[in-house]
């Protein structure tokens, strides 16, 4: 059972219309229709999570292969392949989304590390200048005491 079939089935079980679901998710009705008809890519993980929450079902319902046996055993292999392809596509998109988020966080951390290193170098220079100033002040005080 592909994503669209699962969505259609759960809407029927929940006695919800596609319009009701569109309002709940704050998206346009044609998007729901295309999902159900299989004329559009499956939604992003965030949308699937909203769907599951709004329909009060586990997210895995949309991610796992369907358990409805095919009417024709000869079609079972092709249907299984289609389900696997749907699941692989969805999982691949989810992994890609997570990788993008990870890469963005990694870039931010690298930038922060770079800034901290620069701050550290500036602090080292300031400490060196302050040490020199203290040393010079100390020498000046000692000279003044020797003169007086």
Image (spheres, helix red, strand yellow):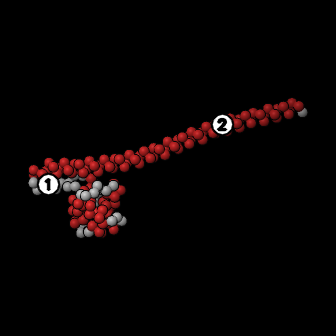
Per the image, label 2 sits on a secondary structure element best described as: helix
Q: At 10% across and 50% down in the image, what residue appears?
A: 74
Residue 12: horizontal and vertical position, in percent?
22, 66
Residue 40 showing in the rendered view:
yes
Q: Residues within 10 Å of mark 1 (few under 14, many from 20)?
A: few
Q: Quadrant of residue 46?
A: bottom left
Mark 1 and mark 2: Cα distance apart in space: 73 Å
Quadrant (top left/top right/bottom left/bottom right) for the N terminus? bottom left
Badge 2 crowding class, 10 Å Cα cut-off, few under 14, some 14 to 19, many 20 or more, is few
Q: Earlier in the sequence, mark 1 or mark 2?
A: 1
Q: Is residue 50 left or right of residue 77?
A: right
* 116 or 77: nearer the viewer: 77
Expressed as whole percent of the image width and height from the top left, the position of residue 88 reads 26, 47
Give the residue number, with chain letter if any, for mark 1: 69
Residue indicated by mark 2? 125
User: Mark 1 falls on what kind of element?
Assistant: loop
* Snapshot quadrant of residue 14: bottom left
Across and down, in percent, residue 82 comes to 20, 50
From the viewer's perspective, tell me whether residue 119 is left or right of residue 14.
Answer: right
């Amino acid at each position: 059972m592909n994503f669209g079939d699962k969505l259609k089935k759960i809407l029927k079980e929940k006695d919800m219309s596609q319009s009701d679901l569109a309002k709940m998710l704050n998206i346009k009705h044609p998007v729901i229709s295309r999902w159900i008809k299989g004329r559009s890519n499956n939604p992003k993980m965030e949308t699937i999570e909203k769907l599951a929450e709004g329909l009060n079902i586990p997210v895995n319902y949309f991610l796992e292969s369907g358990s409805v046996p095919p009417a024709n055993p000869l079609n079972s292999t092709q249907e299984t392949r289609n389900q696997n392809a749907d699941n692989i596509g969805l999982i691949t998109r989810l992994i890609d989304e997570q990788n993008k988020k990870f890469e963005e966080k990694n870039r931010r951390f690298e930038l922060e590390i770079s800034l901290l290193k620069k701050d550290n170098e500036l602090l080292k220079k300031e400490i060196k200048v302050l040490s020199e100033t203290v040393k010079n002040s100390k020498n000046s005080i000692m000279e003044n005491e020797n003169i007086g």
